[in-house]
């Protein structure tokens, strides 16, 4: 971990921007930083609810409103833009060498229901401001710079990271039932197939994001250089008991599916704590049948999710959960795998470059894994080297209206991203 420096200064008030545009390069950096926070607040606030949270679901009116705002900003900067067949925003900033592979930046434009302002939108706004800073400093990269604002990264009936999985060709749109799901959003298998890109032209993919956890905030750090994205493993777990009358069936004679499920959840949560301090286990969804106050539940269905960098750890937890389920009386359990997104490592070269830039600029940082999934994952899955930069989420809050990242950290992270791109453009990419 390096020592925090004083290279990044406070954001300047907006009323001074016009005057400063004619000033020195150091002051140009202030323009960039102020402009980033302004764009983030403007675009990120689209879909704001009365309680202050943000709901900007994929394919929604609010989603496309934010997309058009950012698309307009890209065009003001001279970028070529398009909205692809599945609703992804795509921008291109031409470089000097048309044969050079592209440096790609991206994140997502959608939110969860009643989510926050920063998740996803920070990465797209930050990427656009990289182009703005290049323009301010009259730089033209050797490589083409591409920006993606992905659609429907958050979980949905189409599956998480929908937009980026379409771009990388990871979705089979002809799977039975999937065309009907696409039709809900006015989309079709043809749209999905048409969105696929030739990833051979991509040198790397960089994503700027809030941490969505509390490690950086609690430790007083400014930057997280991401080492990899943890696996996301989900099972649908069904507990089968026997429905019966709630008033006439004595406790010794009950086969209560919900009680059995509750015992398994508590046991699994305890076992996760024992196996690893970086293993997380969550039951965020549960349903009970028949769901009446005066009927003993005959069935309970829950989603068990586990996340860790090491597949062996999640495999062990799953095996232990199955073993514990067999010991719970008066209830039978069935397990169905629903999601198996295994851990993805970030590119060692990109980690090294970001780490060295943080050290050189005396930025307090740490190399750390991501506990959340990101659009970088599909890119890496299809062979594109990935790198990620995290900035702190205050109190570790995310997917909530109280999600917040200090403007100072937004500025620091964007500056590290900018310096990373310059280093890659000048010294770090091989054109094959």
Image: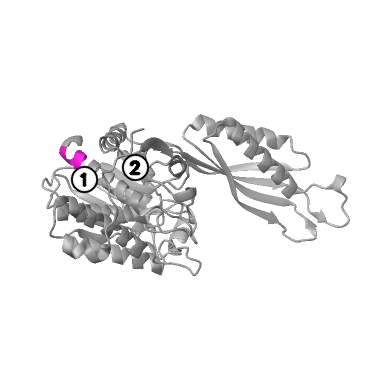
Q: Let me know if residue 283 is in the magenta part.
A: no
50, above or below 271, in the image: below
Asked which secondary structure carries label 1, the reply is: strand
State the separation of the CA atoms marked 2 and 1. Answer: 17 Å
State the image quarter where residue 21 is shown: bottom left
Front position in the image: 62 or 190: 62
User: Which mark is nearer the camera, 2 or 1?
Assistant: 2
Q: Which residue is tagged 2?
A: 388
Q: How many residues crowd around disc 2 within 10 Å: few (fewer than 14), some, or many (20 or more)?
A: many
The percent position of residue 11, horizontal first and vertical second, equals: 29, 56
Quarter the C terminus occupies: top left
423 part of magenta stretch: yes
User: Where on the picture, by quarter, is residue 355?
Assistant: top left
Q: Report the label total.
A: 2
Residue 56, position in %: x, y?
43, 63
Q: Position of residue 117 (x, y in %)?
A: 41, 59
Q: Is residue 107 visible?
A: no
Which mark identifies residue 80? none
Residue at the spot x=29%, y=57% of the render? 36
Where disc 2 sits, the SS reads: strand
Magenta residues: mostly which secondary structure?
helix
Report whether residue 13 is seen. yes
Residue interval drawn in magenta: 421-426
The residue identified by callout 1 is: 102
* Residue 45, percent from left and from top: 39, 65
């Amino acid at each position: 971990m390096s020592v925090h420096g004083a290279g990044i200064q406070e954001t300047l008030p907006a009323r001074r921007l016009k005057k400063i545009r004619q000033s020195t390069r150091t002051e140009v950096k202030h323009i960039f930083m102020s402009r980033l926070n302004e764009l983030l607040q403007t675009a990120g606030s689209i879909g704001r609810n009365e309680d202050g949270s943000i709901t900007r679901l994929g394919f929604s009116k609010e989603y496309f409103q934010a997309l058009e705002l950012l698309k307009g900003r890209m065009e003001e900067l001279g970028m070529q833009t398009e909205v692809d067949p599945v609703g992804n925003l795509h921008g291109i900033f031409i470089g000097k060498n048309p044969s050079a592979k592209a440096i790609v930046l991206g994140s997502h434009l959608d939110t969860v229901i009643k989510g926050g302002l920063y998740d996803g939108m920070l990465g797209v706004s930050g990427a656009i401001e990289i182009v703005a800073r290049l323009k301010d400093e009259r730089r033209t990269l050797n490589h083409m710079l591409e920006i993606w604002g992905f659609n429907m990264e958050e979980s949905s009936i189409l599956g998480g990271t929908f937009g980026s999985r379409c771009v990388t060709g990871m979705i089979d749109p002809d799977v039975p039932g999937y065309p009907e799901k696409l039709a809900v959003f006015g989309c079709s298998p043809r749209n999905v197939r048409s969105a696929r890109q030739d990833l051979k032209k991509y040198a790397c993919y960089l994503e700027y994001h809030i941490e969505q956890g509390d490690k950086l905030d609690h430790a007083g750090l400014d930057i997280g250089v991401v080492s990899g994205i943890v696996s996301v493993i989900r099972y649908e777990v069904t507990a089968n008991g026997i429905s019966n009358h709630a008033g006439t069936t004595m406790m010794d004679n009950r086969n209560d599916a919900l009680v059995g499920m509750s015992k398994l959840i508590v046991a699994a949560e305890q076992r996760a704590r024992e196996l690893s301090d970086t293993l997380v286990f969550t039951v965020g969804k549960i349903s009970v049948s028949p769901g009446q106050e005066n009927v003993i539940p005959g069935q309970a269905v829950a989603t068990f999710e586990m996340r860790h960098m090491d597949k062996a750890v999640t495999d062990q937890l799953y095996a232990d959960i199955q073993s514990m389920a067999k010991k719970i009386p008066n209830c039978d359990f069935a397990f169905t795998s629903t999601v198996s997104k295994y851990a993805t490592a970030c590119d060692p070269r990109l980690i090294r470059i970001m780490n060295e830039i943080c050290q050189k600029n005396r930025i307090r940082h740490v190399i750390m894994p991501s506990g959340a999934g990101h659009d970088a994952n599909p890119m890496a899955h299809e062979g594109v080297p990935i790198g990620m930069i995290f900035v702190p989420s205050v109190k570790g809050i995310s997917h909530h209206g109280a999600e917040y990242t200090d403007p100072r950290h937004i500025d620091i992270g964007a500056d590290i991203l900018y310096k990373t791109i310059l280093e890659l453009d000048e010294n770090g990419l091989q054109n094959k």
